Amino acid sequence: MKYIYTFFCLFLLSGVAYAEEPITGAFGQKLGATIDENIHKFNFGYSMEDARQAPVYNFFPEKNIGPFEDYRVQATPATKRIYKIGAVGRFTHPAQCLPERIVLQMVLETKYPSLKSWTSKDSYTWEVYTKTPHRFISVECKYKDEAGNKGHQLNASEATISIRYVDSALADVVLKERASMLDDSNF
């Protein structure tokens, strides 16, 4: 009986060790939470980084983290649920971006040790993701040359680092909500 109890305890502990750490949010914001007009300020814009054109809100975290200056959330248009949390920082010395991305990767790998991760061939992008619910974190360096064209780290005059926490299932709701908000009497 004592061995069965010991085996059962070890079995339960091993399940905890291999459990997926959920991605819930960042910078004091939670994925799936409703926009709070006291915290989130509509920035008179819509997302242009994808075709969803979801409302974008600025917020200020309790404390700034690393190189990040601008903090934003994107929300579903009707229910105003947060599906993306992001932050952006800028470097005038582009060589600083990649080491900073690697530091953030190391911190996130420590926080989410059981999650799958992926690094781009050029090492500028790193992602970690969960399968259920499908959420991911992406940390990316982008480089621009003197003319403002996308470039490589070696010929860049400036760099930006961005981090995004995304709930893919909620992101898929954006277009459905936009369609439900249209007045179909004119069609």
Image: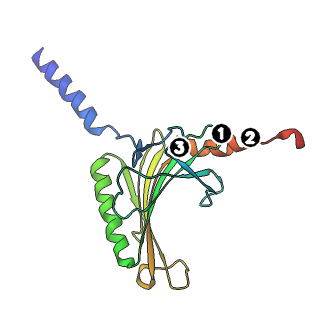
Assess disc 3: are there few (<14), some (14-19) or many (≥20) residues with their C-alpha within 10 Å of its C-alpha: many
**Label 3 to label 2, Cα distance in Å?**
18 Å
Task: Check disc 2 and report the residue beneath it.
Answer: 181
Find disc 1 in the rendering and name its residue: 78
What is the CA distance from the residue labelled 1 to the residue labelled 2? 7 Å
Report the side of 47 relative to 137 (left or right).
Answer: right
Residue at the far right in the pictured view: 186
Q: Which residue corresponds to the image point at 68% horizontal and 40% vertical from the top-left? A: 177
Distance CA(mark 3)–CA(mark 1): 11 Å
Most extreme residue toward the left is 2
Circle count: 3
> Most extreme residue toward the top, as rendered?
1
| Residue drawn 35% across the image and 40% down it | 20
Q: Position of residue 132 (x, y in %)?
A: 46, 38
Q: Type of residue at label 1?
A: Ala
Q: Badge 1: few (under 14), some or many (20 or more) residues near its Cα, within 10 Å?
A: some
Q: Residue at x 44, y 74 (%)?
A: 159
